[in-house]
Amino acid sequence: MRYLPNSDQDRQVMRDAIGIKSDDELFVRVPKKVFDTAKPDLPDHQPEFAVEAHIRQLAAKNRAGGDGPFFVGAGAYRHHVPASVDHLIQRSEFLTAYTPYQPEISQGTLQMLFEFQTQVANLTGMEVANASLYDGSTAAMEAVLMARRLKKRDGVVVSGGLHPQYRDTIATYLGKDPAFKCMQADPQAQEDIVAQIDDSTACVVVQSPDFYGNLRDLRPIAEAAHEKGALLIAVFTEVVSLGAIESPGAQGADIVVGEGQSIGNPLTFGGPYVGLMATRPNLVRQMPGRVCGETVDAEGNRGFVLTLSTREQHIRRDKATSNICTNSGLCALAFSIHMSLLGEKGIEHLALLNHQQAVKTADALSKIDGVEVLNSHFFNEFTVKLPKAAAPIVEALAEKNVLAGVPVSRLEAGKKELENLLVVAATELTSDADIEALASALKEVI
């Protein structure tokens, strides 16, 4: 976005309009003592080419995901994004289309979002999906608030396998609500979450594959929740997994939420990403965000509309289902283009490649003395227990140009029992040489 400064004349016109003589009058209520009049510690201006050279030097200090063996996951994954995705999303008609507030002149954007919703519904095994949310963590939070509205109950049970940042996002909204039950961290998926469900429970939140990589059978949890009149919210952070495992919808989930970054969207230092949400038709009126629908005009031509957008903040204000007032439209477009290129067979094959490379990685690490793979089954991510704290080992491996994974202690600080755990992810971009390099370097560091 270009910066277009106002001229002195422009500023004087604005000052005259509001009846002030100087800009300082805008800040008369700010105490003088908080103003810092000292010159900031910044270099003097430089020619453009000198600034570019300096920025390039700073950028060179970064290590890109493709610069060597890369096994980092824990909610954001390095996958191949076809060049055609980036080319298409930068077409001006897509790149500048912010959001379809005037649907009658936004047919292209609406059609894209309609196709995106269809893809998400098919992937998750649900009947209806919305036109994206900010990211996976806020989607999980929105699902919890949606369930509480629907059930008119406050009880929320959160699995110990939920991504810690997703858990913390939910906790930010619920505060210290005594009805919020968050189970202890569960690296081996041994918790008895069914025992926590009672007549006050509005929803149960379970991730599969979970933060530690475990695949979970959602059916018994769904049955127990439904028996008590509660909803099951199924969460995923790795959307590629839906190409291999049975969909959450087929396992009885009522609301499915997750992160769509893995398809069409690169790592980009943590964002922006795209939150996915799908649900059952009878729950759709409480689903946040917007839904695009297909219709015909007066002459019978196919057209697209915003359906149920009256739930949104810009229309309903304090009566809206959430404070969401936009969607990650460009990221959703990237998702939809990549998903269209893959097709059903493509996403299944991609998922198989991910699983195969993860199995190879787990086999290689399990042969190292003192290293234990905790998962009995997983998709493309798993947890290993190291003989000593994982964080220093990861730093030592980074010095050898190997990014070995995410120490659990980074996201679960202060929990002594978790400090030796390392979450390792492999994708289709993980080569056999990368796996060999990780195993060799880890063995040496240990």
Image (cartoon, rainbow, N blue to C red):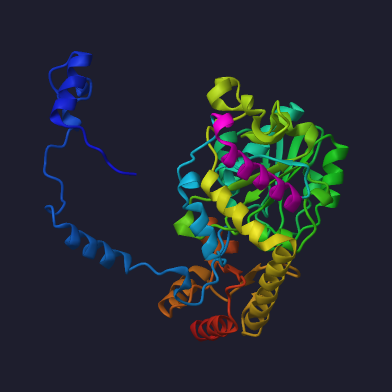
Q: Is residue 211 left or right of residue 232?
A: left
Q: Is residue 198 left or right of residue 268?
A: right
Count of numbered circles on the image: 0
Does residue 316 appear in this view?
Answer: yes
Residue 387 in the image, given as x and y percentages of width and height: 58, 76
Residue 60 in the image, given as x and y percentages of width and height: 32, 69
Q: In this view, does 302 lie to the left or right of 165?
A: right
Q: Residue furthest front?
A: 299
User: Up-down: is 120 above or below 266?
Assistant: above
User: Up-down: is 426 above or below 100?
Assistant: below
Query: Which span is picked out in magenta?
Result: 102-124
Residue 85 in the image, given as x and y percentages of width and height: 54, 59
Q: Viewer-proximal residue, 98 or 137?
A: 98
Q: Where the N terminus falls, by quadrant?
A: top left
Q: Residue at x 68, y 68 (%)?
A: 350
Instruction: Residue 37: name its quadrant.
Output: top left
Q: Which residue is drawn at 70% across and 38% down?
A: 156
Q: Viewer-proximal residue, 234 or 280?
A: 280
Q: Viewer-proximal residue, 165 or 122?
A: 122
Does residue 260 appear in this view?
Answer: no
Q: Viewer-proximal residue, 218 or 394?
A: 218
Q: Is residue 352 left or right of residue 34?
A: right
Residue 263 in the image, given as x and y percentages of width and height: 60, 58
Q: Which residue is drawn at 36% across and 67% down?
A: 62
User: Up-down: is 22 above or below 389?
Assistant: above
